[in-house]
Image: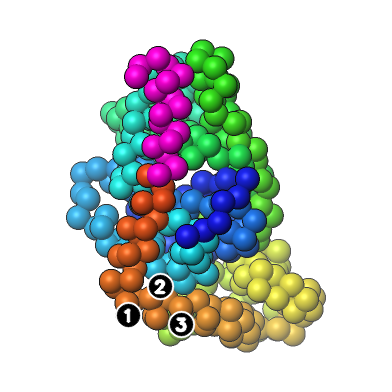
């Protein structure tokens, strides 16, 4: 059982598909570091996934399992961190209902990601779940009375809505929730294989569950400078995803590679080979941990069951505070 800590974090990822390197570099690596300092709840938010995948839930259970393996492979220690499947903890849904009653509709309609998702996924008739996604996110965080939330700079605005909802609840019913603070996470943003944003919907990801052979194959297929047709042509490394990956895994080596690329003395094939070697070196320990956990399915089941037990104990305590504050019980 993890020791009690004064500072609490809830952070999570959706399970609409396999986790990729962007998830690892942007969140998982940071969680591993933070678990020694915080009471950490690492969520697998399957209910959030239903906002866009409600028609076909056949792969959801497998995706939950894959996410749990990726969390463990990344280095989350179940003795320190509760790995929590959102739907296994009823308080997430209970608090979501109560917060939805006090959240003005205008607050939700102004959230940029609501419009973006509607446009990107061509959703003509959005569900309440899609519109109310930020309220469920706020419930996820507040039900643990989280003091901090690790976010990138581009996510700070999203967290502010959670803080506004906490302030509104506290104003209406008395001080119940801390206003969670943004814990800024600086990380290298990895582009997709095609140099767009790495996204499962684009099919341009390197997944944590990919084999060494698959990683090398994907790196060989990576988009490169279209103006660098021959090896000796001058390149533009700032526009090349190969250079971005090189910088993420070996900043010093990338600094040396950039002028060689620009001068035409470093070809794309050789550069990709260098980057693939670096990635395999970094990912091999992760792959080994993943294989070890995958060989022990009963222990993974127990990790998730124990994570749910710890989460229920924490969140039921919160809900008792909420019911009393609202004079409903």
- Asked whether 88 falls inside the magenta stretch, the response is no
Q: Residues within 10 Å of mark 3 (few under 14, many from 20)?
A: few
- Quarter of the figure that contains the C terminus: top left
Say whether disc 1 or disc 3 marks the residue closer to the N-terminus: 3
On the image, numbered disc 1 is attached to which residue?
295
Q: Position of residue 109 (x, y in %)?
A: 46, 23
Image x and y of residue 90, in percent: 31, 39
Residue ID for mark 2: 209
Residue identified by numbered label 3: 288
**Which of pointers 1 and 2 lies earlier in the amino acid sequence?**
2
**Residue at figure coordinates x 50%, y 76% from the top left:** 286
Judging depth in this view, the residue of 292 and 4 nearest the camera is 4
Q: Nearer the viewer, mark 1 or mark 2?
A: 1
Q: Which residues are magenta?
A: 313-329
Q: Main secondary structure of the magenta part?
A: helix
For the residues labelled 3 and 2, the Cα–Cα distance comes to 11 Å
What is the C-alpha distance between the residues marked 1 and 3?
A: 11 Å
Which label sits in the foreground, 1 or 3? Answer: 1
Which is nearer the N-term, disc 3 or disc 2? 2
Please give left or right for residue 328 compared with residue 240 in the image: left
Relative depth, front residue between 237 and 98: 98
At horizontal 57% and vertical 45% (from top left) the residue drawn is: 8
**Looking at the image, which residue is at 63% across and 45% down?**
6
* Callout 3: SS: helix
């Amino acid at each position: 059982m993890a020791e009690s800590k004064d500072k609490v974090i809830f952070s999570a990822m959706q399970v609409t598909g396999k986790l990729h390197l962007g998830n690892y570099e942007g969140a998982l690596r940071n969680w591993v570091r933070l678990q020694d300092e915080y009471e950490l709840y690492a969520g697998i938010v399957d209910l959030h996934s239903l906002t866009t995948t409600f028609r076909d839930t056949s792969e959801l259970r497998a995706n939950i399992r894959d996410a749990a393996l990726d969390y463990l492979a990344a280095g989350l220690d179940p003795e320190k961190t509760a790995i929590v499947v959102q739907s296994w903890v009823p308080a997430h849904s209970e608090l979501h209902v109560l917060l939805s009653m006090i959240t003005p509709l205008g607050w939700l309609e102004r959230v940029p990601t609501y419009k973006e998702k509607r446009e990107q996924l061509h959703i003509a008739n959005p569900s309440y779940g899609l519109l109310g996604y930020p309220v469920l996110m706020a419930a996820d965080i507040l039900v643990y009375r989280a003091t901090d939330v690790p976010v990138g700079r581009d996510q700070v605005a999203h967290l502010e809505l959670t803080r506004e909802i906490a302030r509104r609840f506290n104003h209406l019913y008395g001080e119940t929730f801390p206003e969670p603070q943004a814990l800024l996470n600086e990380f290298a943003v990895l582009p997709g294989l095609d140099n767009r944003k790495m996204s499962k919907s684009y099919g341009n990801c390197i997944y944590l569950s990919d084999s060494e052979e698959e990683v090398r194959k994907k790196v060989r297929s990576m988009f490169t400078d279209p103006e660098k047709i021959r090896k000796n042509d001058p390149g533009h490394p700032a526009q090349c995803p190969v250079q971005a990956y090189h910088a993420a895994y070996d900043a010093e080596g990338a600094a040396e590679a950039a002028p060689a690329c620009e001068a035409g003395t470093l070809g794309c094939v050789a550069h990709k080979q260098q980057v693939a070697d670096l990635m395999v070196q970094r990912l091999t320990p992760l792959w080994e941990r993943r294989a070890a956990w995958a060989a022990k399915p009963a222990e993974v089941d127990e990790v998730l069951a124990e994570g749910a037990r710890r989460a229920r104990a924490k969140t039921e305590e919160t809900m008792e505070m909420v019911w009393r504050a609202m004079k409903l019980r």
